[in-house]
């Protein structure tokens, strides 16, 4: 089971819900639930077949790019910087697993 993948998905979704709760931001809620759901489905897929990481990788990459851009423009660590760093960590984890650096290689 892809526990880190599910935790990451839950944190992204919870961040969207929190953004809505704190600031009334509907786009935050929609993005959090959409990306959190995609990441959760990606975690289900990698739990079934570790070589099926495409959805997780694509979603993490999009989040890293968008939130990195927001962090660059705003300088705010929370939430943009934190989500960008979590996304980069997930990308590195996926790359490590895919290449066999952090565990058995799955092809």
Image (spheres, rainbow, N blue to C red):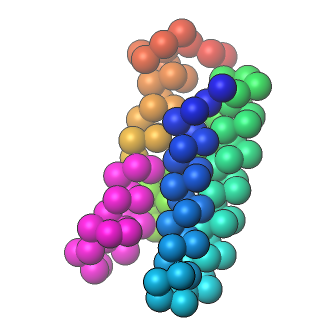
* Relative image position of residue 43 (x, y in whole percent): 66, 38
User: In the rendered view, does 67 fall on the left or right side of 46?
Assistant: left
User: In the rendered view, does 43 fall on the left or right side of 17?
Assistant: right
Residue furthest front as drawn: 21
**Does the image show residue 58?**
no
User: In the rendered view, does 19 fall on the left or right side of 85?
Assistant: right
Where 93 sits versus 71, above or below?
above
Main SS, magenta residues? helix
Residue furthest top as drawn: 104
* Relative image position of residue 7 (x, y in whole percent): 54, 44
**Residue occupying the point 37% across, 68% down:** 80
Can you say which quadrant of the picture contains the C terminus?
Answer: top right
Quadrant in the rendering for residue 106: top right
Residue furthest left as drawn: 75
Can you say which quadrant of the picture contains the N terminus?
Answer: top right
Quadrant in the rendering for residue 32: bottom right
**Residue occupying the point 41% across, 59% down:** 83
Quadrant in the rendering for residue 37: bottom right
**Residue occupying the point 61% across, 76% down:** 29
Residue furthest bottom as drawn: 24
* Relative image position of residue 6 (x, y in whole percent): 60, 42
Question: Is 81 included in the stretch rendered in magenta?
Answer: yes
User: In the rendered view, does 8 fall on the left or right side of 54?
Assistant: left
**Does the image show residue 105?**
yes
**Residue occupying the point 68% across, 47% down:** 40
Where 38 sits versus 17, above or below?
above
Where 10 sits versus 66, above or below?
above
* Relative image position of residue 19 (x, y in whole percent): 50, 78
In this picture, which residue range is highlighted in magenta?
A: 67-87
Question: Is 11 included in the stretch rendered in magenta?
Answer: no
């Amino acid at each position: 089971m892809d526990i880190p993948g599910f935790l990451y998905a839950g944190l992204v979704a919870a961040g969207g819900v929190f953004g809505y709760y704190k600031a009334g931001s509907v786009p935050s809620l929609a993005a959090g639930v959409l990306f959190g759901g995609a990441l959760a489905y990606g975690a289900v897929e990698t739990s079934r077949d570790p070589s099926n990481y495409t959805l997780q990788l694509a979603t993490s990459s999009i989040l890293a790019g968008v939130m990195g851009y927001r962090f660059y423009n705003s300088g705010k660590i929370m939430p943009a910087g934190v989500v960008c760093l979590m996304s980069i960590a997930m990308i590195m984890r996926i790359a490590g697993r895919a290449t066999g650096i952090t565990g058995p290689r799955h092809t």
